[in-house]
Image (cartoon, rainbow, N blue to C red):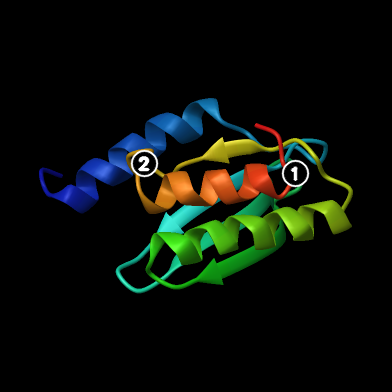
Amino acid sequence: MRNKRGQRELRHKRIRAKVRGTSARPRLAVFRSNKYIYATLIDDEKGEILGTAQGGKAAGKAIEVGKMIAEKAKKLKITHVVFDRGGYVYYGRVEAVAKGARDGGLEF
């Protein structure tokens, strides 16, 4: 577990022990790969995925992903979410998704 992926997974487990999504306040989970960035709204109580959005690699695309997930949340009448950064550092694309979601109207 000394490699980067293992360390991120450990951080994500620590975060997930504290962060839970409900139907009133779902979890906004972020995953980033080398090629794309993904944002997902999750209701942990029911074990359901409420909506997803994905986009390209650049930070500008990440802001668009945040705005897309905010639009989907508005359609579901969701205004408050819990942000799950997925073990990543809150910087760059992860921060851009959060900024886009806030610009789209989500509060967290």
Q: Quadrant of the N terminus?
A: top left
Mark sitting on residue 17: none
Give the residue pinned by disc 2. Answer: 87
Q: Decide if residue 88 is on the left or right side of residue 80.
A: left
**Residue 38 % position (x, y):** 51, 63
Residue at left offset 78%, top offset 53%: 73
72 versus 91 height, above or below: below
Query: Could you tell me the amino acid type at mark 1?
Result: Gly
Query: Could you tell me the amino acid type at mark 2?
Result: Gly
CB contact under 8 Å: marks 2 and 1? no
Give the residue pinned by disc 1. Answer: 105
Determine the image quadrant of residue 59: bottom left
28 versus 24 height, above or below: below
Residue at left offset 51%, top offset 71%: 55
**Residue 22 % position (x, y):** 75, 37
* Circle 1 residues within 10 Å: few <14, some 14–19, many ≥20: some
Q: Decide if residue 51 is on the left or right side of residue 4.
A: right
Determine the image quadrant of residue 91: top left
Looking at the picture, tell me which residue is in the foreground, 69 or 59. Answer: 59
Looking at the picture, tell me which residue is in the foreground, 61 or 43. Answer: 61
Of marks 2 and 1, the one in the foreground: 1
Residue at left offset 32%, top offset 35%: 11
**Residue 30 % position (x, y):** 49, 52
